[in-house]
Image (cartoon, helix red, strand yellow):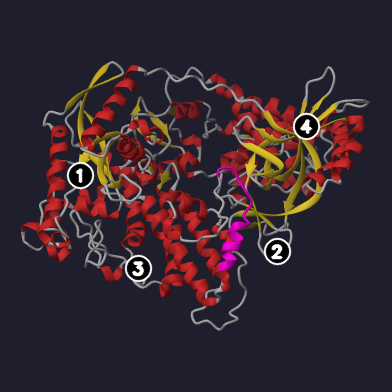
């Protein structure tokens, strides 16, 4: 056993220590050239490849237990014994294909001492010296090259050839790439990503050979997305007979008015299946009307307020639910045909989607929010509903509620004196199954209060600020599918959930920079920065709530974001609330939404947003078609006729045709040779918008630049220039550059993706740059395909540092213009001027 120095071939060392000391001195005295370094690396990479090729005859993964293998083996054994319990729990039988591929391509770490060389030492030496572990590549070029190497399995030799080719022809003073392929692989090996760590576990010893299983340990974080990823599904499925399947039943119930005056109402209940993916389940055709629940009418107000009548209403509701649902819970399950195959299912109710009063009806908790324990999730006192520092909460469940009920102590926990039908059903805790609904909790609930209290706060600090809010809202620039608040907030009590969702996307910009100091010496004065911050934190929390997957880390971040908003909400608005923010929805959201995600998956899977539209199809339209007598009978007959037609006419969906770029609303047309005179004439028209005038001034110069630098075409003598006001992109987005659209100018702002050559030259928003469309033109050149161009004025970051505010880019409009192919436009964006500031603009990241 010996070690040989690559730079002193005559020197051979019998011990690793002496070899190591020699290399330290050798490195100081030897000045390696770049080419020599590459050659040395290539030699050892080829040796490594030959070594691996010689071991292809191994039929199983194994490792020799020789003492000659060095200290690494002992260290691994120590780690194995230390983590034995964890590793044994982590082993699974379903090792993925990617895991197998990973280990097929791994180099053996326990190289023989004879093969130990300068490269091995350098790697060891670097590992010792570099305490900080890299978590990303030094630059994009480095990352792109290593992606090519990995994706196409390039050898070290091929990679080094690419590096040399790039360095020779790039003309860069300093190469952004790695010195050689081995350096890149070493850097990637040092990157510590917890989910990609690999381990080995000794399975047995046979003929004095230890056999190891190499694997990726699953310490992992559980991820919650579809309902089947939740804990409820796992626990319920485990309780079913072997060979059967779980059929998850989702209920949605909500009484609604049938006419505009609200004199008549119906109480529909709908059903859906949790086995269907969330995205598909949020379509209207995956939900079915289960029935119309009876609505009792009192003979007078006195009877309506009586305890007996209220008890009868709740009892009727639960008896109706029993009649509807009992057939689903046969002891032997049900057989369903899916894709021409029969499956054995056991139906179980997973979630009940409803608003807060309806949840109280299902759980039979007192409806009044002033009751001692108004939360149907837990036993929290009404005095603590606004507390954001609770540490001990007792949850309601079927067992403890039945104990209170049958001991005649239901009133002690705000429980109605009626047996709950859902206690008798398997695998449902009705108190947690009535999940928090985002639309009622946030859109129509807490955000409504936040707007209301903001108005009260501004009214107290300076009454003119309320009018200033309305004025700013009316000046928000137009955007596709964005409702304009031309009259300000007006009466927020009449706003719909959709309007609130639109409003929350712009309010952070409206309250930004709204006022300066406490000029009126107001008590409990709130700084403008804090008011802006509570809206920014709201948006962060709300956007997180719409995530399509949550890991435990994500849930922790979501919880952190939620409590940051909640604490600031309480701090700012508590003085303006008559109840001191003792809202059950506030408590329910900040304390119970996270466990609901763990139990039933993402929030998008149980929100009433997608159910509200059902009222139109199953209640309001059929009601209007009736003669208002025996309404329910007529509605059921109408729905039956519609179902018959749908079954008969059921056809396969036609494939959507690919949308091409399309112009409309032609504004101007001229020849290239006459364009200068034509544009000058139009600029004198008083009805022409300043943006179009600016476009006319810049067009010809930008066109020449486009021909020279982009198309590299010269000597075009004539062409037709047709200017349009509207263009529809291939993705369906509509861009406009018009004097008037519904009596107001509309000039779209767009995002353009920069290519890799440009992204390093400019400051961009993750590869995106922004511009305002001034003109759109189709250029028709004889015997050439038409050019679809947009004249844009560019935005740039307002500041080189602190380029973002409220997580949105802060920009300025610069005097830089270009003609770009419309096909290069990535999408339209919503730009909002920063009020009371000159040439400052936000890119509204809260809207898409």
What is the C-alpha distance between the residues marked 2 and 4? 46 Å
Q: In the rendered structure, are the residues bearing label 1 and label 4 in contact, judged by CB atoms less than 8 Å apart?
A: no
Q: Quadrant of residue 493?
A: bottom left
Name the secondary structure under disc 3. Answer: loop
Name the secondary structure under disc 2. Answer: loop
What is the C-alpha distance between the residues marked 3 and 4? 62 Å
N-terminal label among 2 and 4: 4
* Residue 487 position in % (x across, y down): 56, 58
**Disc 3 packing (10 Å; few <14; some 14–19; many ≥20):** many
* Residue 197 position in % (x across, y down): 47, 40
Identify the residue under disc 1: 428
In screen coordinates, is 66 left or right of 83? Answer: right
Identify the residue under disc 2: 837
In screen coordinates, is 152 left or right of 715? Answer: left
The segment highlighted magenta reads: 467-481
Let me know if residue 770 appears in the view.
yes
* Residue 678 position in % (x across, y down): 88, 37
What is the C-alpha distance between the residues marked 3 and 2? 37 Å
N-terminal label among 1 and 4: 4
Let me know if residue 118 appears in the view.
no
Identify the residue under disc 3: 386
Residue at figure coordinates x 55%, y 31% from the top left: 112
């Amino acid at each position: 056993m010996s070690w040989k120095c690559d730079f002193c071939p005559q020197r051979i060392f019998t011990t690793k220590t002496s070899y190591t000391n020699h290399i330290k001195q050798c490195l100081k005295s030897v000045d390696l050239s770049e080419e020599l370094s590459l050659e040395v690396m290539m030699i050892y990479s080829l040796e490594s490849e030959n070594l691996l090729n010689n071991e292809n005859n191994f039929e199983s993964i194994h490792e020799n237990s020789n003492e000659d293998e060095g200290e690494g083996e002992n260290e691994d054994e120590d780690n194995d014994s230390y983590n034995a319990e964890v590793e044994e729990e982590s082993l699974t039988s379903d090792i993925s294909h990617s895991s197998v591929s990973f280990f097929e391509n791994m180099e053996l770490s326990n190289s023989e001492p004879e093969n130990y060389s300068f490269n091995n030492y350098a790697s060891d030496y670097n590992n010792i010296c570099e305490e900080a572990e890299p978590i990303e590549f030094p630059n994009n070029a480095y990352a792109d090259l290593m992606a090519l190497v990995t994706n196409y399995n390039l050898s070290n030799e091929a990679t080094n050839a690419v590096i040399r080719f790039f360095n020779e022809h790039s003309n860069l003073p300093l190469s952004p790439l790695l010195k050689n392929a081995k350096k890149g692989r070493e850097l990637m090996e040092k990157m510590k990503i917890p989910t990609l760590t690999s381990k080995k576990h000794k399975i047995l010893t046979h003929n004095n050979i230890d056999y190891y299983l190499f694997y990726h340990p699953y310490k992992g974080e559980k991820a919650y997305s579809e309902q089947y990823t939740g804990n409820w599904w796992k626990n319920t499925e485990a309780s079913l007979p072997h060979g059967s399947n779980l059929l998850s039943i989702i209920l949605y119930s909500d009484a609604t008015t049938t006419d505009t005056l609200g004199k008549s109402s119906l109480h529909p209940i709908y059903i859906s299946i949790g086995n269907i993916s969330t995205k598909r389940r949020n379509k209207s055709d995956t939900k079915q009307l289960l029935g119309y629940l009876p609505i009792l009418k009192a003979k007078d107000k006195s009877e309506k307020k009586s305890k007996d009548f209220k008890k009868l209403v709740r009892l009727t509701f639960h008896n109706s639910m029993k009649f509807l649902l009992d057939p689903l819970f046969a002891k032997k399950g049900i057989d369903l045909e899916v894709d021409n195959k029969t499956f054995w299912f056991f139906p179980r109710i997973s979630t009940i989607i409803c608003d807060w009063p309806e949840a109280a009806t299902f759980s039979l908790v007192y409806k009044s929010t002033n009751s001692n324990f108004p939360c149907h999730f837990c036993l929290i006192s009404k005095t603590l509903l606004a507390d954001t520092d609770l540490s001990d909460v007792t949850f309601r469940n079927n067992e403890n509620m039945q104990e209170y009920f049958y001991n005649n102590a239901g009133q002690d926990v705000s429980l109605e004196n009626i047996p709950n039908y859902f206690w008798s059903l398997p695998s449902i805790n009705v108190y947690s199954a009535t999940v928090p609904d985002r639309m009622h909790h946030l859109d129509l609930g807490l955000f409504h209060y936040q707007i209301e209290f903001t108005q009260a706060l501004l009214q107290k600090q300076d009454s003119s600020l309320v009018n200033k809010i309305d004025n700013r809202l009316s000046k928000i620039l137009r955007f596709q599918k964005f409702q304009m608040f031309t009259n300000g907030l007006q009466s927020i009590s009449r706003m719909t959930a959709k309007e609130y969702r639109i409003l929350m996307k712009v309010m952070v910009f409206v309250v930004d920079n709204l006022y300066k100091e406490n000029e009126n010496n107001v008590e409990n004065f709130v700084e403008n920065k804090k008011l802006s911050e509570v809206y920014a934190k709201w948006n962060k929390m709300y956007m997180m709530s719409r995530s399509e997957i949550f890991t435990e880390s994500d849930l922790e971040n979501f919880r952190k974001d939620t409590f940051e908003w909640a604490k600031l909400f309480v701090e700012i608005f508590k003085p303006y609330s008559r109840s001191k923010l003792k809202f059950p929805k506030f408590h329910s959201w900040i304390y119970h939404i996270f466990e609901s995600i763990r139990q039933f998956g993402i929030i998008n899977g149980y929100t009433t947003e997608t159910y509200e539209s059902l009222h139109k199809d199953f209640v309001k339209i059929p009601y209007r078609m009736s003669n208002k007598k025996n309404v329910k009978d007529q509605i059921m007959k109408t729905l039956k006729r519609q179902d018959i037609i749908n079954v008969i006419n059921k056809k396969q969906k036609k494939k959507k045709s690919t949308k091409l770029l399309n112009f409309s609303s032609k504004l101007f047309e001229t020849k290239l040779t006459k364009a200068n005179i034509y544009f000058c004439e139009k600029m004198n028209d008083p009805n022409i918008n300043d943006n179009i005038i600016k476009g006319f001034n810049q067009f010809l110069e930008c066109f020449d630049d486009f021909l020279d630098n982009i198309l590299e075409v010269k000597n075009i003598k004539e062409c037709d220039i047709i200017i349009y006001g509207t263009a529809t992109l291939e993705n369906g987005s509509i861009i406009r550059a018009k004097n008037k659209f519904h009596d107001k100018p509309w000039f779209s702002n767009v995002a353009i993706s920069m290519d890799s050559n440009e992204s390093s030259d400019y400051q961009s928003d993750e590869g995106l740059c922004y511009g305002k469309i001034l003109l759109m033109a189709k250029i028709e050149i004889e015997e050439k395909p038409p050019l679809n161009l947009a004249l844009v004025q560019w935005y740039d970051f307002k500041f080189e540092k602190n380029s973002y505010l409220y997580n949105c880019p802060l920009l300025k409009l610069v005097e830089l213009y270009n003609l770009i192919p419309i096909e290069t436009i990535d999408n339209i964006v919503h730009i909002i001027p920063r009020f009371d500031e000159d040439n400052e603009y936000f890119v509204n990241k809260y809207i898409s």
